[in-house]
Amino acid sequence: MNFTLTEKILRDHLVEGSYEPGKEIGIRIDQTLTQDATGTMAYLQFESMGLSKIETELSVSYVDHNTVQVGFENADDHRYLQTIAKKYGIHFSRPGNGICHQVHLERFGRPGKTLLGSDSHTPTCGGLGMIAIGAGGLDVAVAMGGGAYYLTCPKVIKVNLEGKLPDWVTAKDVILKVLNELTTKGNVGCVCEYGGVGARTLTVPERATITNMGAETGVTTSLFASDEETWKFLAAQGRGDQWLPLESDENAEYDRVLDIDLSDLEPLMAAPHSPGRIVPVSDLEGMAVDQVMIGSCTNSSYVDLMTVAGMLKGRRLVPGVSLGVAPGSRQVLQMIAENGTLSDLLAFGARILESACGFCIGNSMSPKTDSVSIRTSNRNFKGRSGTPSANVYLASPTVAAAAALKGEITDPRNLEMEFPRVRMPERFKIDDSMIIPPLPEGERAKISIYRGPNIGAPPANDPMPENLRGRIAIKVEDYVTTDHIMPAGSRLKYRSNVPKYSEFVFEPLDPEFSKRAAELRDQGIHNLIVAGVSYGQGSSREHAALCPMYLGVKAVMAKSIERIHAANLVNFGIVPLTFVSESDYDSLAKDDDVEIPGIRAAIEGDNEVIEAFDKTAGNRVLLKTELSKRQREMLIAGGLLPYTVRKKR
Ligand code: MIC
Ligand code: SF4
C-alpha cells in the first residue's frame, strides 16, 4: 500500500468508522495534555463521569496560562489541578515548569502516538512525528476516560520542502510562508504533512515551530516524519529508546502538494490583526517599534533564545523599546542560566518573564496605546495583547531581536553582523523535579480534592426543544475569533467560574451582550448568534461555547464555523448551522425574532437542511446541518455530557 504518514498513524488508532476522507472516524488516544485555563473545566467534567482513574497511556496536566495569580482564583485552580492529578494517575507539571507544548515536546511526545490536548497548539508535538490534535476540554476528558476521539477523516496536504534555510531566515518564516499560501480559512478537515529533502534539514524544535503555528491555518494538525533528526532530539532529551522511524510511503498520494524551496525564503511577518496577513520584513523596514516580546509556545526553544542572545550580546537596548523574553520551559531557562546567556540578555536590557504563556495570552506586558509590538508568538488578533489599539506583528526571533537592536523594523540580513549559528545541544539539561509523577494506584483513594471558592460545577444544558423560538442576540462579522467571544487576558482567572466568566461573553464586540442575553434567557427566549466566515477561529477554549450556552444560546447561524469551535458547540448542545446561500447573512438583523419549527425532529431525522423563519423581517432562510449521527444524538441530549450519561444507562 501507499499510505501517507497521517493515514498510517490514524489507521493504527482507528476504533470507529472506516478511513474515508470527509467521513467521521473515532480514534484511540494514547496521550492527553491539559493546561490550567482549559483544564479545570476538563477535570470537573472528568470527575462527573464517575471514573476512578485515567485510561490513557499518559496524561499530563500543565499549569502555564494563569500564573500571574492576581487574587486567589488562580492559586485555587492550581491546587485543585494538583490534587486531581494525584487522585486519578495524571502527571502534574507545576507552574514555572514551562509552556505545555514546549514541555510535552521535550519530555513526553513520542513518534507514532496520538495526543489530544485541550489547547489549539497541541499540534506542536507533530514535530516529533505524532498525530497531535487540539480539542475542547470535554473531548479531552472523554479521551482520558478511554473514550474515542471523533474527527473528520482528513484530506492530506503535502508541504514539500526543498533546499535549506539561508542565514537569518528561520522556521517561523516557513510557517508564515505556508500561511501566506493556505491562508487562515478553507483548511478545515485537512492535515499538513511536511516532507521532502528540506524537511530533513530542520531540527525538531524548528519543526515544532512550524506544526505549532499550523493551527492558524485551521488544519486539524500538521506533522513531520520521524527520522534521524527526531532520534537526535529524543536522544538529547535522554529518550532515545522512545524513537522509531516513521515516514509516508514513497508513492503515497496527497490531496494537494505545496512546494516550498527553503533557500528562496526571506524574513516575513504577519501584520495586524491576523496571522494570515503576511508581508516581507523588507516592506516594513524603518517602522518604529515600541515593544519586542520573545517567547510563547511557537518560538521559545533553547536555540531560539541562544540565537537572540548571540545577536544582542555586548549591545544595549534602545531607550524607546521595551524587550521581554519568556523562555518556553524551565529546561530552556536553566540551560541559558547555566551557560551565562541569561546574563547577556539581562545586560542588554531584557526583562525576563516566567516560563509560561504570559504575554501571549495578554495577561501581562500589554503594550502602550497605539503601539507597535513585535512578537514571536502565533496570534495577533485585535486586542489579544491586552491593548485594543496596539498593532502586533508576528515575526521570527531574529527579526524580533533586530527590532530590539535598532528600535525599528529591520531585516536582520541588513544588520552588519555575522549570523550567530547555534546548534541544537547534544544533551539537554534533564531535571523533571517540577513534574509530579502519578501516585501508585493503591495510595490514591485517600487523596481529597481541593476546591477553592473559585471552582464551580459546570452548568448543564437542557435537551433540544421541539421548536426553537429565539432572538438574534448578536450579529458579528467575518473572522470572529474565540478571543472575541470569550476574552482571556485579565478575565482569564474566572475560567473555573462559569456564571462569572459569562459576564464577559463578546465583551470586545458588544459589552452589553451578556446582560441582554441573560435577560432573554430568563424570559424563556433562546438566544441566537449570526456570524460571518470562519466563526470561532483560534483557541480551543470551550468556554466560547459553554458560557454562551449558560446565557441561553441555542444555535449559531454562520457563513462558516471553525473545526474545534464547531465541535465545542455540539458538545454543549448548541446547534452549528451554516447558510445554504451566504447572502442570507445580510437578511438577518440583530434583535430579529427567528423560529426554527421542528428543529428537534429535523436533527433526529437526519435532515441536511433546515428552515428558519425570520418573523421580524418575514424571510425564510435555509441552513445546513453538517452533522454526524453521533453529533445529532448529542444535540438532542443537550450536549456530550448528558449524551455520555444517557449511553451508559
Ligand atoms: C490561546 O493561545 O489562545 C490559548 C489561550 O492557549 C488557547 C487555550 C485557552 O483559551 O485556554 C488555545 O490556543 O486553545
Ligand atoms: Fe500559551 Fe500562547 Fe501557546 Fe496559547 S499560543 S499555549 S497562550 S504560549
Image: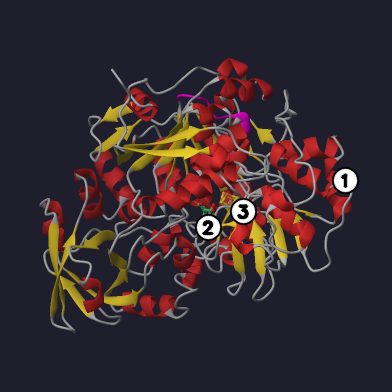
Mark earlier in primary sequence (2, 3): 3
Q: Which percent across, then down, holds residue 573?
A: 29, 57
Q: Which percent across, then down, holds residue 475?
A: 33, 75
Q: Which residue is mark 1?
A: 343
- Label the magenta part by its dominant secondary structure: loop
Left or right, 102 with respect to 314, comes to left
Q: Is residue 505 above or below residue 419?
A: below
From the image, state whether disc 1 or disc 2 is nearer to you: 1
Q: Which percent across, then down, holds residue 362?
A: 62, 62
Quarter occupied by the C terminus: top left
Question: Is residue 278 rendered magenta in the image?
Answer: no
Q: Residue furthest top?
A: 241
Quarter occupied by the N terminus: top left
* Cα–Cα gap, marks 2 and 3: 33 Å
Disc 3: CA contacts within 10 A as few (<14), some (14-19) or many (>=20) = many
From the image, state whether disc 2 or disc 3 is nearer to you: 3
Left or right, 249 with respect to 33, comes to left
Q: Which residue is mark 2?
A: 496
Mark earlier in primary sequence (1, 2): 1
Disc 2: CA contacts within 10 A as few (<14), some (14-19) or many (>=20) = many
Q: Amino acid at mark 3?
A: Ala
Q: Please give the name of the residue rendered at 32% of the width and 33% of the height, measured from the top-left corner.
A: 254
Q: Please give the name of the residue rendered at 34% of the width and 48% of the height, measured from the top-left corner.
A: 188
Label 1 with label 2: CB-CB less than 8 Å: no
Of residues 394 and 354, the one nearer the viewer is 394
Magenta part of the chain: 106-112
